[in-house]
Amino acid sequence: MLALQYVRSIPSYALIKASGGRPDVATSTISMIHLGDLAEPPLPGPDWVRVRSRVTGICGSDLAALTGHASFYLDPLTSYPFIPGHELVGQLMDGTRVVVEPALGCKVRGIDPPCARCAEGRYGLCENVTEGSIGTGLQTGYCEDTGGGWGEVLVAHESQVHKVPDALPDEAAVLIEPLSCCIHAALRAQATEDEVVVVFGAGAIGLLTVAAVRRFTPPKRLIAVAKHPTQREHARRLGADQVVAPDEVFQRVRFATGARRIDGMDRPLLLGGADVTFECVGRASSLNDAVRLTRAGGRLVVIGMPGEERVDWAPIWQRELQVTGAYAYGVEKVKPPRRTFELALEVAPELELERLSGPFFPLSEYREAIEYASASGRLGAVRVCFDLRGLIP
């Protein structure tokens, strides 16, 4: 099968990480991605199926692995070499279209009884990700034994597979995985109708967080922080009451909440501010802004994948902020309890997710695709994808 395989090179990764992602060095990291003809991954057990990739996204976490932004914390939770691609829509051998829920928890690994987290329905936080019938890995696309969406064929446990409704096009279904992440984050924050919510960042995760908050926990006011014109248009369409540029966010949140602004030596802060802030970028600048414009006792949800970012902890300490991570998905505490992927598939048709995906590249043009994805916001794209439908027999 044709596939893009990530082959770890510690010297190359260390070089790009030390450079801070400088473009002239970053291009050399594509040498860790190899396009070639590989054997299809074997089925790890009788409850596994083969999935042919149709469309797969180039996620921010994929780019982080290529540009040195990913934390070394994740390295021992990954097995190499792996085929990337955890945002995907594919098809079973009988032609049924499916999305794959990537989390590799106890059930997927054949471990019984499950760990405490999986027993709670929080299998994205599985404590057995180094054990069981497959190699180490938090998710499909970061495990040497499962394959991933950047290859023609991957394998998935039956519990990971969700049928795609006929009315949902591939271009929308490819975003079910990130939408699930954002629904999970919104439900963790539990914003109320009396609160002001700020969403930092308007890439795929930021925009889908806007959509998730609007539909599952609608607040009094939802403010999106977006840098580029296309992002602003999508944020309004998906439910933001107000869309502001990064350089005006303190002033706009001040007006929306009645807070007082104080200008400091490095950046301003608000006395008062947002009740809930979602940080969807994962960078030091937006993290430091987020902790300074969230009110005392407020909630900060970190959903953008961070690396080793330098964050000033003084506002977190002095404001007694509730800071929480939001990673992956599971079984949500709604009535009745539902898997996050089920909720995402249910609301997806009304969101017109296909408007967020593209352009589409064949695997053979992976260099151009990765370069485009790295500049997607500036170029007016949200989720750049690989299109493998032409490879399906």
Image (tube, grey):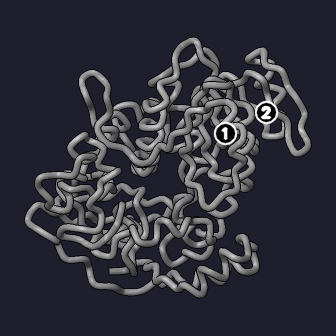
Callout 2: SS: helix
Q: Is residue 136 left or right of residue 323?
A: left
Callout 1: SS: strand
Residue 148 point in image, percent of width and height: 36, 68
Residue type, mark 2 in image: Val
Residue type, mark 1 in image: Phe
Rendering quarter of residue 11: bottom right
How many neighbours does mark 1 have within 10 angstroms: few (below 14), some (14-19), or many (20 or more)?
many
Q: Tell me what residue is drawn at x 59 percent, y 55 percent.
A: 306
Q: Circles 1 and 2: CB distance less than 8 Å? A: yes
Name the residue nearer the viewer: 380 or 130.
130
In the rendered image, which residue does mark 2 sit on?
A: 249
- The alpha-carbon separation of the residues under discs 1 and 2 comes to 9 Å
In the rendered image, which residue does mark 1 sit on?
A: 200
Q: In this view, does 249 lie above or below 392?
A: above
Q: Is residue 46 visible?
A: yes
Q: Is residue 166 visible?
A: no
Outermost residue toward the top in this view: 194
Q: Tell me what residue is drawn at x 26 percent, y 41 percent.
A: 121
Name the residue nearer the viewer: 388 or 135.
135
Residue 303 point in image, percent of width and height: 54, 45
Residue 162 point in image, percent of width and height: 25, 47
Q: Is residue 388 left or right of residue 206?
A: left
Rendering quarter of residue 83: bottom left
Picture quarter with the N terminus: bottom left
Q: Tell me what residue is drawn at x 11 percent, y 60 percent.
A: 47
Q: Tell me what residue is drawn at x 44 percent, y 47 percent.
A: 327
Q: In this view, does 152 lie above or below 237?
A: below
Q: In this view, does 144 lie above or below 48?
A: below
